[in-house]
Amino acid sequence: MKTIFKNLAWVILGFIFIGGLLSLWSDNKAKIETIGFDRLVSEISEDKVQKIQINNDTLAITLKDGTKQTATKESGQPLSELLSNLGIPADRLAKLDMSVTSPTGAKAWLTALLPFLLPVIILGLFIFFMMRSVQGANNRAMMFGQSQAREAPAAPKDKVSFKDVAGNKEAKEELSEIVEFLREPEKFTALGAKIPRGVLLLGSPGTGKTLLARAVAGEANVPFFSISGSEFVEMFVGVGASRVRDLFRKAKRSAPCIVFIDEIDAVGRKRGSGMGGSHDEREQTLNQILVEMDGFEVNAGVIVMAATNRPDVLDAALMRPGRFDRQVVLDEPDLADREAILGIHARQKPLAKNVSLRKVAERTPGFSGADLANVLNEGALLAARHNKKIIDQLELFEAIEKVMLGPERKSRILSEAEKNITAYHEAGHAVVAHFLPNADPVHKISIISRGQAGGYTLKIPIEDRHLHTKAYFIDEIAVLLGGYLTEKVLFGDVTTGATSDLRRATALARRLVTDYGMSDNLGPRTFGDKEEMMYLGREIREQRDYSEKIAEAIDGEVSGFISQGMAKAQKIIKDQRAELDTVAALLIKQETIEQEEFESLMGKKV
């Protein structure tokens, strides 16, 4: 339909263009005066006429002053005879420059037929464009069940290799082996090894699953087909399965090759979880993928790679050996990996000499590769906004906070009372964190609004942690409650500014009981089945596997952990009241305190 309207618009523009030409031609003709034959005779008698061109019965007259005129004579009689009969003497006629012009055959035919042919030609072109649009729509309808997979070129301009992927050493080794198998299969088959059927990339969003797939495409000298899982699913039953068959048909013709399915959880969810039963379109598509990967027909030379950040929802038949033989887990980058990733993304960016990517990496624990790329990009944008030619360390530090919390909201002006409460609230977080042995050190305190936060206290661990103790979690709860308790102790009332802190503290205390088994009274077990369930399109996050009595006990244990954190935070707030006042006063004065200045006031963290 869009193409039809486009062609119709072109035809209308053509009509307007032709109409403009015709109007221009008619305007030019209108400038030549048409006179009667009697006036022509008088002008000849007065010796005003210089030249007359005769074209059939039409006379093109040019006067001696350059004026052009036109007149019409009687047909069937020469002009000289007519003028002689009207009293023009022979000597005057001899002085006239009279010439006869006649159109050629082609011009005569064109002049006669063009007024009739032009509308027919325009109408024919319009019908042609309409028919071509309808034919294209029919062709697309016939291709409805064909795969939309894109084949990577042999030497793409934006080629990505394993050198462009930092971190994830084990994942790169696994995929390098796949590439080597495709390049030199004899090396492995000589030992009886078989090529893996499928490789599943698992990891949180932004950890580089798709980037690694692009690196495989760049490293392997074999065809590489890529498609998204959502491209299989359509509103018509059977289209997804048809596209799967067409995709693997193309892949088998190009074998050995790699097929990459991004976000496979769009079609690979557990069967029987929806309302469509065995006729569900998604289930039919999944069944076809299972058959193509390991069915009756031998599928030699085609390796299927897939990526997902939801392995918990995938069907068990996809995960078994023979289909996805290898499951490659991509973890969040550690300190060394973050520094390497920053180095890759900083290649095309002019950094100042004082920039330390190591310090940036230290301030970004828990950041994924995509987050780190965003930090450097935001730093470049900030430097450009400040009219700088290079990116400084301060821009990168500010970019970290912008990625974590959002942009500064300097237009949000606080009253003196609100500013005082916010300063003591953030000082409470910072002082409690500083004096608790298991809490992370404070790197920055600010009462400038960012995103949804009215102020923030930035705590960063000294080193990457993979295991956390119960004491660490209780200290973390105490730090979260530090701002709330400071408001309560100092002002005798609390505000809505602690809403997010209370929510996070409650969620953390509940995880200690239900997920981590750290409750002394309930023992080392978990509570609640976190397996995803679907009912009428609604996702139910937890299914109870305990009684109401246990639920009451869980609530009691959650309250107990929060009480332990409150006791710790309250003691520090009362004991360190002078330090709390000092930090709050400095915050009110300059709004931001960095780590060095904070430790100069409080001393080094023990």
Image (cartoon, rainbow, N blue to C red):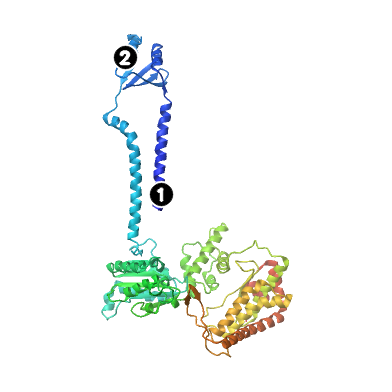
**Image mark for residue 6:** 1
Please tell me which residue lies in front, 575 or 297.
297
Disc 1 element: helix
List x then y, in percent, for residue 388. 55, 58
Quadrant where the C terminus sits is: bottom right
Disc 2 designates what residue? 80
Disc 2, SS: helix
Percent position of residue 515, x then y: 53, 83
What residue type is disc 1 on?
Lys
Where residue 98 sits, quadrant-wise, is top left
Horizontal arrangement in the rendering, residue 69 relative to residue 113 (left or right): right
Q: Dividing the picture into quarters, in which one does residue 479 lie? A: bottom right
Q: CA distance from mark 2 to mark 1?
A: 58 Å
Task: Name the image quarter holding residue 216.
Answer: bottom left
- In primary-sequence order, the first of circles 2 and 1 is 1
Left or right: 535 with respect to 596? left
Residue 23 vertical placement versus 318 (above, below): above
Q: Position of residue 428 (x, y in %)?
A: 67, 76
Question: Disc 2, disc 1: CB below 8 Å?
Answer: no
Residue 604 can be seen, yes or no: no
Q: Is residue 594 visible?
A: yes
Q: Amino acid at mark 2?
A: Ser
